[in-house]
Image (cartoon, rainbow, N blue to C red):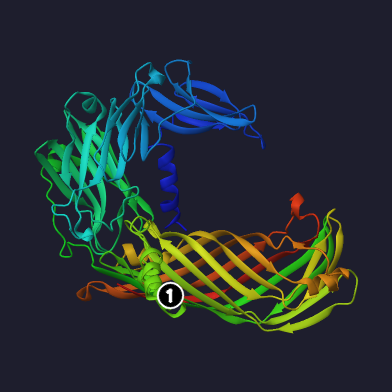
């Protein structure tokens, strides 16, 4: 757990505050309180009281003053309005507003200005401190941006922007990115310029939480950029600006055997510059200190694999001998009316997946496009209609979705779902039904930075079950066993995948890990009028409530072993072995729609647990 939990939590913590000072806190006023607790905001030696709905959005600490920004939702008539309050450690006066700036990052200046940077501009909200609001435009194509401050009182800003191509039809993979740095006082001056230098980033690099900046005094700055070029060439790079035409750069703690640079920070202390970042290979946050003279003498040593990989791929297969336990019931007002218990066969859950790209093309997208073309060719005889469908339906634009680290993964999974269903209505004798089925699932996942992913899933399988029905008043009408009952699911998932993390960021490594996934989806309950007749003795009336909600989650604990062959530019394999637990809960449908009250509503709830040891084998490049 220690390896990837810091990756997930660091991004959340940094959105609240850039290393908030301990002198700014928002805590329960009474530690023994358990519900709707009032809170105490402490800013320096000043304290303020808020209710349980307040939250600390941002804090800043300077040598002479501390600041805190609080949000508080307030109900006004039939709507909720969020108020924002700015406090400082100098006096008890607070400043309020209902509108604040947002963006990629933000900070509070020493005089109480809220400074935000987004993809288009730097926005300064001065109303808190009695100053005018201001807006300063940025170049186009901003990919990353950060606002930070020097404790002496200077707000520093930096952003990374994609450079304009030298010629019109330039290859996207050859795009270059430049770093721009300045401070708030500088951009307030007329005809001010940003310090600029070109980075080593490319189109498929990471762009989330990769940048930090601070002032070294006398118009000098140091910035830290996490630069991912390929699995062998990645790490934290320091850029040191002495003047507009004098910039030094160098790698910090760079190694092929570990990944250092997530969530960087730059601080000044007694004339020294301290760079810190997360080493995701070990789970530790490490820092390195340099003097100004050492920074000025830095030189960048180019890696032998200096360029982005033209081809990247990951093919994998997973096998899990699975124990599958299921509980399904029909209950009304907490009274059990019918139930089904399952003795499921132990079978092997198999899954196959692929992802990757060559150049600017996604392997999975190309596969989907080819499959779609085949479907169009077989289904449509008219050549003109075929070409129109291919042009406007099949050849969709995916550039925006798969920018940066993102690649598309296709997953196919199957599990034989046979067994014996033992069902019972009320106090009637229990009956049994033996069945065979196959559970098939499909996933389309966007694999993102730092091992994270999101996407959609669909599954479909037969599962003979007890199906209950309630009448328009919500009273139990009857239940029957449906031998042909079927479940169809469609939903979204969010998770972390250790194999994907290792494929992108590591070369040769092995460690224990914890991965997980959470999901939410809709479930279609397939039953028919024959079951309705068996349950209540009539086929009259509509069957409502066929769609309900599913919550699901997966947790796996395991060990990964990965090796690459450097002479083959990173071709290698990874093996992941461990124990996996998958839980699914189908919520009982409680339809309150008046339009559905003329018929019968399905009453059905279910819990599934699939668990067992597993092994995943991956080929990576």
- The residue shown at (36%, 38%) is 105
Where residue 52 sits: x, y (%)? 61, 32
Where residue 601 sits: x, y (%)? 78, 60
Query: Which image quarter: residue 29?
Result: top right
Q: How crowded is mark 1: few (under 14 residues within 10 Å), some or many (20 or more)?
A: some
Q: Is residue 511 visible?
A: no
Where residue 165 sits: x, y (%)? 17, 52
Q: Is residue 598 left or right of residue 124?
A: right
- The residue shown at (55%, 32%) is 27
Where residue 31 sits: x, y (%)? 62, 34
- The residue shown at (55%, 78%) is 414
Residue 369 vs residue 497, the one in the foreground: 369
Residue 611 vs residue 421, the one in the foreground: 421
Count of number-bearing discs: 1
Q: Mark 1 points at which residue?
A: 376
Residue 10 vs residue 547, the one in the foreground: 547
In this rendering, the answer to whether 482 lies above or below 249 is below
Query: Which image quarter: residue 589?
Result: bottom right
- The residue shown at (13%, 36%) is 242
Label 1 SS = helix
Q: In this view, does 597 lie to the left or right of 175?
A: right
Q: Which quarter of the image is occupied by the C terminus?
A: bottom left
Q: In this view, does 240 lie to the left or right of 556?
A: left
Q: Can residue 112 be seen in this view?
A: yes
């Amino acid at each position: 757990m220690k390896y990837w939990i810091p990756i997930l939590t660091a991004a959340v913590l940094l959105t609240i505050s850039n290393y908030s000072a301990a002198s700014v806190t928002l805590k329960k006023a009474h530690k023994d309180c358990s519900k709707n607790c009032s809170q105490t905001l402490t800013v320096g030696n000043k304290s303020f009281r808020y209710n349980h709905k307040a939250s600390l959005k941002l804090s800043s600490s300077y040598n002479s003053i501390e600041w805190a920004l609080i949000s508080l939702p307030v109900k006004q008539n039939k709507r909720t309005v969020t108020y924002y309050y700015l406090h400082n450690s100098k006096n008890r006066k607070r400043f309020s507003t209902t509108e604040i700036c947002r963006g990629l990052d933000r900070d509070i200046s020493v005089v109480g200005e809220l400074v935000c940077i987004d993809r288009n501009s730097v926005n300064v909200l001065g109303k808190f401190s009695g100053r005018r609001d201001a807006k300063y435009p940025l170049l186009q194509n901003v990919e990353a941006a950060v606002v930070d401050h020097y404790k002496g009182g200077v707000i520093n800003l930096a952003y990374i922007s994609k450079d304009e191509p030298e010629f019109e039809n330039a290859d996207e993979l050859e795009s270059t990115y430049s770093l721009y740095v300045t401070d708030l006082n500088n951009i307030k001056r007329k005809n001010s310029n940003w310090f600029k230098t070109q980075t080593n980033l490319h189109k498929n690099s990471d762009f989330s939480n990769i940048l930090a900046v601070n002032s070294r005094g006398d118009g000098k700055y140091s910035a830290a950029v996490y630069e991912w070029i390929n699995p062998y060439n990645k790490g934290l790079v320091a850029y040191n600006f002495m003047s507009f035409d004098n910039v030094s750069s160098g790698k910090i703690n760079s190694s092929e055997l570990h990944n250092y640079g997530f969530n960087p920070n730059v601080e000044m202390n007694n004339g020294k510059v301290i760079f810190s970042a997360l080493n995701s290979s070990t789970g530790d946050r490490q820092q390195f200190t340099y003097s100004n003279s050492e920074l000025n003498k830095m030189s960048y040593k180019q890696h032998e694999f200096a360029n982005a990989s033209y081809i990247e791929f990951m093919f994998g297969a997973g096998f899990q001998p699975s124990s599958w336990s299921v509980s399904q019931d029909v209950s009304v007002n907490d009274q059990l009316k019918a139930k089904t218990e399952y003795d499921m066969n132990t079978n092997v859950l198999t899954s196959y997946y692929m992802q990757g790209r060559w150049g600017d093309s996604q392997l999975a997208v190309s596969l989907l496009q080819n499959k779609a073309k085949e479907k169009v060719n077989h289904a449509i005889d008219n050549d003109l209609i075929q070409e129109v469908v291919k042009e406007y339906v099949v050849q969709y634009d995916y550039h925006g979705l798969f920018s940066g680290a993102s690649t598309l993964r296709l997953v196919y999974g199957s599990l034989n779902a046979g067994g014996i269903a033992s069902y019972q209505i009320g106090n009637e004798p229990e009956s049994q039904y033996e069945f065979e089925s196959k559970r098939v699932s499909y996933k389309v996942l966007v694999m993102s930075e730092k091992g994270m992913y999101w996407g959609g899933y669909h599954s479909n399988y037969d599962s003979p079950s007890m199906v209950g029905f309630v009448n328009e008043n919500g009273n139990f009408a009857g239940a029957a066993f449906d031998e042909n009952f079927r479940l169809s699911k469609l939903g979204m998932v969010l998770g972390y995948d250790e194999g994907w993390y290792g494929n992108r960021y590591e070369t040769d490594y092995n460690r224990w890990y914890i991965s997980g996934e959470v999901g939410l989806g809709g479930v279609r309950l397939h039953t028919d009028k024959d079951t309705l007749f068996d349950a209540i003795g009539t086929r009259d009336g509509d069957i409502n409530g066929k769609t309900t909600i599913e919550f699901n989650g997966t947790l796996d604990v395991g060990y990964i072993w990965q090796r690459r062959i450097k002479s083959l530019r990173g071709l290698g394999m990874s093996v992941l072995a461990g124990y996996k637990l998958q839980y699914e809960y189908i919520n009982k449908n409680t339809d309150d729609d008046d339009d559905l009250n003329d018929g019968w509503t399905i009453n059905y709830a279910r819990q599934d647990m699939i668990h067992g040891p597993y092994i995943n084998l991956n080929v990576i490049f």
